[in-house]
Image: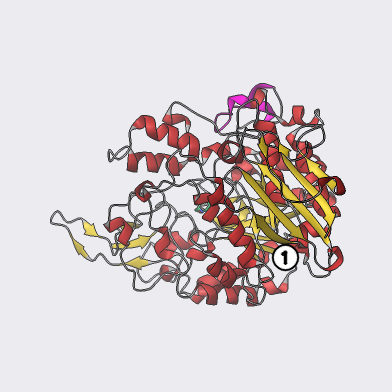
Amino acid sequence: MSVSTQWWQEPVIYQIYPRSFQDSNGDGVGDIPGITTRMPYLANLGIDAIWLSPVYKSPNDDNGYDISDYRDIMDEFGTMADFDEMLKVATEHNIKIVMDLVVNHTSDEHEWFVQSRSSKDNPYRDYYIWKDAVGFEEDGTPIPPTNWVAAFSPSAWEWDETTEQFYLHLFSKKQPDLNWENPKVREEVYDLMRFWLDKGVAGFRMDVINLISKDQSYPDDPAVAAGAKTDSLVMAANGPRVHEFLNEMYREVLSHYPIITVGETPFVTTADGLLYTGFDRDELQTLFQFEHMGVDSNPDAKLGKWNDTRFELVDLKRILSKWQDDLSGKAWNALYWNNHDQPRAVSRFGSDSPEHRVRSAKMLGTTLHFMQGTPYIYQGEELGMTNVFFDDIKDYNDLEIHDSYEKLVGSGAVSHDDMMRYISASGRDNARTPMQWDTTENAGFTTGSPWLKLNPRYTEINAKEALADENSVFYHYKKLIELRHAHPIVVNGTYKLLDADDNQVYAYLRYGQGESEGQVLLVISNFTDAELERDYGYDLTETQLLISNYEDAPAGNTLRPYESVVFAFKA
Ligand code: NOJ
């Protein structure tokens, strides 16, 4: 590939949410041996690396994002021997493994926290964030240090009777925040990172890594004071020492290994992005920004992500193009449409109707994979898996869904029926229904009783049928990956948006650099089910068609429903 790109800019990375991928022992929960058996499927798709959501020991309050031992494997997922075998088989298939690093918080069942909460003078006390009550209500209820609302519970502070202090938890009360001000905590984190890197993993996706440095004055959250019903995570975002900590992590650990890093960073602008990932910054290589995930968030900010309004394409284009332009030549994007926390892309940005699902899923793949950055595929995206609707709240597992239901329906802010619609549009379980492998009972995911219900559309949408159909979404994604591997311009080309005000079509150019200097790509995607006329001023008869989501040739300047085409030509 081009001399100017690094290996971590070139791969396509596939995210596995192990709980929902493949069960091998009939207990209804996906596991590591299950992933190993599916390695040939992933090699056939052509991916270069897997981002593995957490597999560490965990009591599963937040499905593995609450870790009780960073050096061991969750019982339901298998053993360390199973992990080593998976790593070996992945390597044989030329697939790297990127681990999830969850170090803003641990589980409350982690030994450090068990020690920490046992007494005020325990050596582990300062591993977490403990504060006195600022006063007491008349009935004796202690008043927390700030008004912060946690992501998965009403208050971010939990009173601990034993030592009569509050501890901070930005997420559930079973996920106490680590105290990064304490150098010993940072050393422990660097050590556990080395443990996994020395095993041969290829890097880390870092969970909410921009929340690790808290403003030591602990101010109140003005949004909560104004009546917001969701959470106060923003109060911990991009804190005073975060760059110092990441720079230290880079010096101590990251710079010593040839690895890939991607930070999960809510509440970042492109200016923040440059600070975290600038080529000259020695912090992270890439980050997951969230601006495009907020494109359809509720105009009534009090309800946050809970709504079912449709995004506007001009907004999506503006946000993604801003990231493309502002990072160009200075830093590198991570490209994604969905993950284990987001609804399914085809339902959200395309169409999941039987008529348009396949075509629009391919269109979304093309639109994303031809931008500049490292693309991620979330399990099942390559099949065009869709959102799900359960009519009983009990069928949902996710603690965020249940907590938000309590906060919003419980307080009377939203009706039950509206909330059920919002959950089906935005809830995290849309991404977490088990992988759809075939048409047998439970879609070949498990022979037991699945931990979360299957999406009933598995009889129509599954890997077995996709593999048997040369026009499936699967083969379209396979071709996208092949094109990236074959044409340096897909990796290194610069980006230019066309027609920013067009609310129906997303069109952009890529200009080759270095070895692909003089080459141009024109990417055109119709985001609607209508037939449209568009003329970008190029003689398309003089171009090479690299990929299309229609079987027959493009029809001149006419774009058919959800049509997506990429043309290559010389400047
Ligand atoms: C972000 C993760 O992606 C999400 O699944 C998790 O609940 C929170 N961080 C807390 O770890």
| Prevailing secondary structure class for the magenta stretch in the rendered image | loop
What residue is disc 1 on?
A: 259
Q: Residue at x 80, y 62 (%)?
A: 512
Q: Secondary structure at mark 1?
A: loop
246 sits to left or right of 565: left
Q: Nearer the viewer, residue 140 or 202?
A: 202
Can residue 45 be seen here?
no
Q: Which residues are magenta?
A: 440-457
Q: Nearer the viewer, residue 456 or 492?
A: 492
The N terminus - image quarter = bottom right
Three-letter code, disc 1: Ile
The C terminus - image quarter = bottom right
* Quarter occupied by residue 565: top right
Q: Is residue 94 magenta?
A: no
Say above or below: 63 vs 116. Answer: above
Residue 317 location (% of width, % of height): 59, 52
Q: Nearer the viewer, residue 558 or 20?
A: 558
Residue 506 location (% of width, % of height): 64, 47
Say above or below: 235 vs 556. Answer: below
Residue 134 location (% of width, % of height): 23, 66
* Quarter occupied by residue 418: top left
